[in-house]
């Protein structure tokens, strides 16, 4: 298993905050720094000083880091046109030396669209646009030098695109898809995903969704083992009970809640839970959601007290 740090900057973070977290992530030996792609805080928080744009942030971090991979979990297909998104991600891939991954979803948070004037179609249309964006982005990246890319869909048309710039990674940055949709989502994963992520779900539900993705892969003749399995879980680690309680309180949660619905507890407890994810769900990768971005010691504690026990 490898471990990635995952942040939610829409809850209130500056670029400087994210830079400190990314540098700590790299120094502590984690595999990657990922961030959400949202424009509005969720829950009761003010979100001040305001959201930061996901791909502007990652472009800057590409120049400020040297090893960790960078990406979104996940960008919304409602936020950007597919051609310009392919350009932006390819450029950040070049800026990072080939360390970028694109997590893409259909979009779900109506309020952030209303708050920033972003059209929010009905679910059926959002999913259609999402599918077409995946077809266009991967098609652009796979276009051979000197050739043109054309596409005609119900929502997007591409005519004579030179498919530039080209990303460093071939045929393009890995695509991360995810969610609990039981029907269309597994089919898209079988077609496009290098990695499938089940976020904030218990192990038994994650296993069910991974099995749907496996079946979808088999239906199209793809080896299910070529899809990386991952989960995202909120982290609340403490070296003792008092520290667990303090970190839970800092993000408005109680100890029982974080133990039951997140990666909450002492190092030994987390090693046991993560072992279950590895053995029962065959998860290859875990995104550790860090909600208190000022608590860099939290990230360092996982690296020093949990990672070595997982081998």
Image (cartoon, helix red, strand yellow):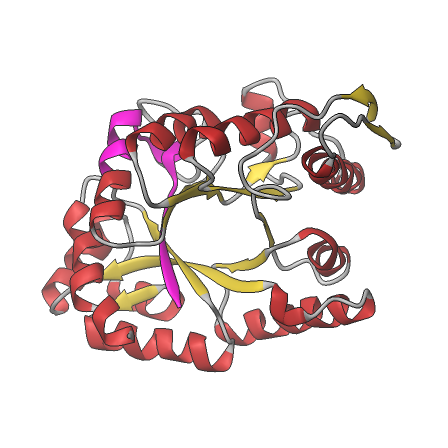
In the image: residue 138, left or right of residue 225: right
Of residues 299 and 266, the one drawn nearer to the viewer in this rendering:
299
Q: Residue at x 68, y 58 (%)?
A: 181
Residue 150 sits in quarter? top right
Q: Residue at x 17, y 67 (%)?
A: 305
In the image: residue 13, left or right of residue 222: left
Residue 156 sits in quarter? top right
Which segment is the magenta one? Answer: 1-20
Q: Image height check: is 182 above or below 64?
A: below
Could you tell me residue 54's position as x and y percent? 46, 30
**212 falls in the magenta region:** no
**10 falls in the magenta region:** yes
Of residues 138 and 254, the one drawn nearer to the viewer in this rendering:
138
- In the picture, the quarter occupied by the C terminus is bottom left
Could you tell me residue 223's position as x and y percent? 70, 70
Of residues 199 and 279, the one drawn nearer to the viewer in this rendering:
279
Q: Residue at x 18, y 45 (%)?
A: 295
In the image: residue 24, left or right of residue 207: left
Q: Residue furthest front?
A: 146
Could you tell me residue 104's position as x and y percent? 60, 42
**Residue 53 makes an appearance in the image:** yes
- In the picture, the quarter occupied by the N terminus is bottom left
Residue 77 sits in quarter? top right
Could you tell me residue 247's position as x and y percent? 19, 54
**Residue 14 makes an appearance in the image:** no
Q: Residue at x 72, y 63 (%)?
A: 182
């Amino acid at each position: 298993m490898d471990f990635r740090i995952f942040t939610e900057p829409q809850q209130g973070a500056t670029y400087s905050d994210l830079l400190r977290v990314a540098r700590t992530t790299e120094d502590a030996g984690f595999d990657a720094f990922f961030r959400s792609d949202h424009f509005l805080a969720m829950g009761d928080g003010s979100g001040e000083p305001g959201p930061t744009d996901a791909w502007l942030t990652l472009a800057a971090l590409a120049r400020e880091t040297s090893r960790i991979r960078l990406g979104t979990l996940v960008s919304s297909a409602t936020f950007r046109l597919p051609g310009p998104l392919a350009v932006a991600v390819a450029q950040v891939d070049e800026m990072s030396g080939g360390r970028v991954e694109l997590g893409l979803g259909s979009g779900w948070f109506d309020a952030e669209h209303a708050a920033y004037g972003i059209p929010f179609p009905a679910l059926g249309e959002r999913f259609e646009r999402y599918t077409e964006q995946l077809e266009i982005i991967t098609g652009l990246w796979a276009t051979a030098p000197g050739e043109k890319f054309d596409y005609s869909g119900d929502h997007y048309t591409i005519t004579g695109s030179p498919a530039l710039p080209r990303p460093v990674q071939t045929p393009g940055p890995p695509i991360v898809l995810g969610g609990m949709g039981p029907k269309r989502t597994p089919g898209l994963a079988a077609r496009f995903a290098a990695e499938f992520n089940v976020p904030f779900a218990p192990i038994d539900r994650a296993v069910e969704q991974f099995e749907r993705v496996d079946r979808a892969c088999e239906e199209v003749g793809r080896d299910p083992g070529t899809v990386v399995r991952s989960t995202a879980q909120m982290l609340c680690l403490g070296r003792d009970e008092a520290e667990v309680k303090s970190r839970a309180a800092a993000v408005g949660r109680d100890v029982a809640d974080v133990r039951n619905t997140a990666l909450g507890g002492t190092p030994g407890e987390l090693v046991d839970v993560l072992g279950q994810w590895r053995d029962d769900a065959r998860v290859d990768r875990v995104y550790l959601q860090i909600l208190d971005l000022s608590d860099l010691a939290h990230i360092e504690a996982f690296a020093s007290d949990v990672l070595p026990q997982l081998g």
